[in-house]
Amino acid sequence: MQIYRIPVLSDNYIFLLHDAEQKLAAVVDPAEAAPVLQLLKQLGAELSAIFNTHHHGDHVGGNLELLRQFPQAVVYGGAEDRGRIPGQQVFLQAGDQVSFGGRQAEVLFVPGHTRAHIAYYFPPASEPIGELFCGDTLFAGGCGRLFEGTPSQMVDSLSQLRALPDQTRVWCAHEYTLKNLQFALTVDDQNPVLQTRFEQVKQARQQSESTVPSWIGLEKQTNPFLRWDLPALQAATQTVDPVRSFAKLRGLKDIF
Ligand code: ZN
Ligand code: FE
């Protein structure tokens, strides 16, 4: 399974999964149809699945046009998103499995950014690398804003993602990394891994390079929203309570 990253809108990513043998493709969160159709044509592949993580327009905007072009494609989304995802046919819950390209993905229920948000986790297959499509729940160096969920839900959701193996690629839906790490340094400035990462990301962005995917292992070392229980973050948020610490951090980021 080959994964392509398609930059769209101002800072979104659509991910296209390609099964070259079967000449099939799946897309994750198609904000727009045109760039997906173009890549499908280039690859000579048919679209067989649309995997949505949540209902926001910049994640589902291309669903209907893609369905018009590939009526056999199946549209997946969270069960709680019923009525909010255009063309949705499959209503997924925690623990459900979806398959593509000979791989099985586990569905994780990760509310917080929205009340219905899900993520797709492909465990390692032939290579020891897992793939996580987490939409707007976890970002490289940050996490999604809480539009419909509570801090306690988001801590639970991020805990599930933090528990995945270090060798998991994090395919998040936005290029927010530089700003996220700028914020991270305001609360975790003595962290040498974070300092190094910030310099690398700054350079990458100066050359218009993408910083996605990230890795769970790297996120655990540098993302303040996965580190609410570490002394430095507890000091910065002045509480040892995980949910309060997270809420304080999220509040600071909202106005950063
Ligand atoms: Zn969103
Ligand atoms: Fe988004």
Image (cartoon, grey):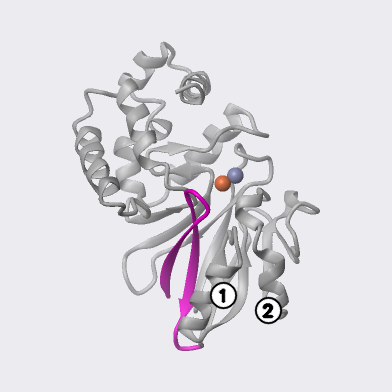
Could you tell me how far apart the alpha carbons at marks 2 and 1 are, in whole angstroms?
A: 9 Å
Q: Which of the 4 quarters of the picture holds residue 93?
A: bottom right
> Which span is picked out in magenta?
1-22
Pinpoint residue 185: horizontal percent, then vertical percent.
30, 26
Crowd tier of the residue under label 2, counting other residues whose Cα lies within 10 Å: few below 14, some 14–19, many 20 or above:
few
Q: Amino acid at mark 1?
A: Leu
Pinpoint residue 133: horizontal percent, then vertical percent.
49, 56
Q: Which quadrant does the C terminus fall into?
A: top left
Q: Amino acid at mark 2?
A: Gln
Majority secondary structure in the magenta region: strand
N-term-proximal mark, 2 vs 1? 1
Residue placed under numbered mark 2 in the picture = 69
Q: Which mark is residue 129?
A: none
Q: Is residue 92 in the magenta section?
A: no
Q: Name the residue: 53% across, 53% down.
A: 9
Secondary structure beneath disc 2? Answer: helix
Q: Is residue 159 above or below residue 9?
A: above
Secondary structure beneath disc 1? Answer: helix
Pinpoint residue 13: horizontal percent, then vertical percent.
48, 56
Q: Name the residue: 44% across, 84% down.
A: 20
Front in this rendered view, residue 191 or 12: 12
Residue placed under numbered mark 1 in the picture = 37
- Res. 100 visible in picture: no
Q: Name the residue: 42% across, 15% down.
A: 237
Q: Is residue 236 above or below residue 92?
A: above
Q: Is residue 7 in the magenta section?
A: yes
Q: Name the residue: 32% across, 70% down.
A: 127
Asked if the residues shown at circle 2 and circle 1 are in contact, with their CB atoms under 8 angstroms apart, the answer is: yes
In screen coordinates, is 16 left or right of 129?
right
